[in-house]
Amino acid sequence: MRYKTMIGLEIHVELMTKTKIFCGCPNDFGGDVNTHCCPVCLGLPGALPVLNKSAVEYAIKAGLAFNSQIATRTRMDRKNYFYPDLVKGYQISQDEIPLCSGGYVEIEKEDGPKKIRLMRIHIEEDTGKSIHTEEADTLLDYNRGGVPLIEIVTYPDMNTPEEARLFLEKLRATLKYIEVSDCKMEEGSLRCDININVIDTQTNTRTNITELKNLNSFKAAVKAMEYEEKRHIALLEAGKNTEGETRRWDEVKNETIVMREKGGVADYRYAPDFDIAPIVIEEEWIDEIRNSLPELPHDKKERFIREYGLPEYDAGVLTQSKELADFYEETNKYAKDPKQVSNWIMGDVLRRLKDEELEIEDLKFGPKDLAHLLELINSGKISNNIGKKVLREMFETGGKPEKIVKERGLIQISDEGELESIVKKVLSENQQSIIDYKNGKDRALGYLIGQVMKATKGKANPQLVNKMVREMIEE
């Protein structure tokens, strides 16, 4: 392949601490504008920051989950730049000595695993939020200012937008597993910047790096990367190059738009923040955090394969999120049929969630309800097809499966005496289908069974109907 794409990511993740990183203001999403503020996070003269220990703990937890080295001595720095939502004129961040160095995230590709190396993970404060009105005014909400962040910076190890998507999904799943962030992109608690360029492997010519900012979903990130990849290749083929610039993704035009010239590290004039004492971290504390880490996605996947006998694909899907994995395990605790539970969750449940753009935690019913539905099917009280209808109503109303079956009169007919007259009537009305079946046309049997199921509104036991139709034809 002549052209090689190089993609590196910078991911900002808001931490779920109770308070902000340098003050006691609540770290809550939303609220009336400018109500979660104090002199410290508003940068008023004389107000001094005090580092939140929980923010450091959460950052260490992320570093350990991503195989990073934890610094035992580090510091906070000032990153100087002007922007209206940056009240102090600088952001408290980390430069030369990040809290976490190195590490990697392993993604699963069709041709095998690939490690995406991490350069660093550091802690910093979030900025306020600019709100642009239709009247061309800009309003500022500083509730978000001072919210604790970790910034995760990768090497440019991703060579396709698809690899970047796999990385982001694995990263988000792990962060949610260790419960340091809710990673809700729609609320801004996970934000992704992309650095992308393309190399002509025949001439070794490479385009200048383009930075893509303000991506509010993984879907938008992939589309923006695909667009930029094509744009860079087209420039190389025309003997041109890109400008070193920052661009944004326009959802309406489906293209990237220039925002500004891309700055360098020197433009930020980093300097130590002497209002905050150096951070000294004891090895015992790091070990304590390491020992408190929960089971991570890869380990859980391996356990699902080993403990439940699931195929690798099933285990991979079910462990994509902690909430989904917990739902599966809780359902199986009652149903005690790992593969059947997997089939229903991966099939009807996830399909419906995807169609309605919901998460597993948004369901109106719980794992025990799904287990009870499977019990009704396995006991022969309802058929598999009726079970799917019941599940649809559970999605819509949150009703209990037993109650839905009883109120809708959906109990499966398994009494031969009750079915005999229906089967005889169907056969008498479809003599040609009987002749076709006897002449070797197997589809005719399916048609006859379908007519019986139609006559019973799907409530007849399909296995029993199959048996009775065959026996009566032979007679």
Image: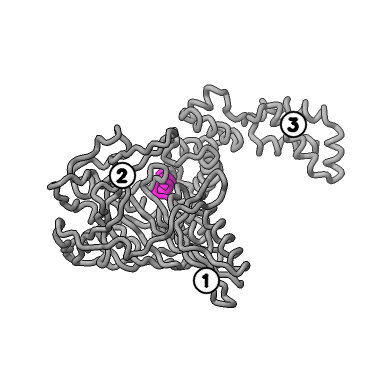
Outermost residue to the bottom: 203
Question: Residue 238: horizontal and vertical position, in percent?
Answer: 62, 67
Does the CB distance between marks 3 and 1 fall below 8 Å? no
Q: CA distance from mark 3 to mark 1?
A: 67 Å
Density class for disc 1 (Cα within 10 Å; few <14, some 14-19, many ≥20) is many
Q: Nearer the viewer, residue 168 or 425?
A: 168
Q: Earlier in the sequence, mark 3 or mark 2?
A: 2
Magenta stretch contains residue 408: no
Q: Can I make out residue 282 in this image?
A: yes
Can you tell which mark lies on residue 206?
1
Q: Which residue is mark 2?
A: 128
Q: Earlier in the sequence, mark 3 or mark 1?
A: 1
Image depth: mark 3 or mark 2 in front? 2
Density class for disc 2 (Cα within 10 Å; few <14, some 14-19, many ≥20) is many
Q: The residue tagged with tag 2: helix, strand or loop?
A: loop
Q: Is residue 392 left or right of residue 269?
A: right
Q: CA distance from mark 3 to mark 2?
A: 65 Å
Where the C terminus falls, by quadrant?
A: top right
- In magenta, the rendered stretch is 321-330
Q: Which residue is mark 3?
A: 451
Q: Main secondary structure of the magenta part?
A: helix
Q: Is residue 296 left or right of residue 210?
A: left
Q: Amino acid at mark 2?
A: Gly
Q: Amino acid at mark 3?
A: Gln
**In the image, what residue occupies the spot 43% across and 55% down?**
260
Where the N terminus falls, by quadrant?
A: bottom right
**In the image, what residue occupies the spot 52% across and 47% down?**
250
Q: Amino acid at mark 1?
A: Arg
Q: The residue tagged with tag 3: helix, strand or loop?
A: helix
**In the image, what residue occupies the spot 45% across and 50% down?**
215
Vertical comparison of 86 with 367: above or below? below
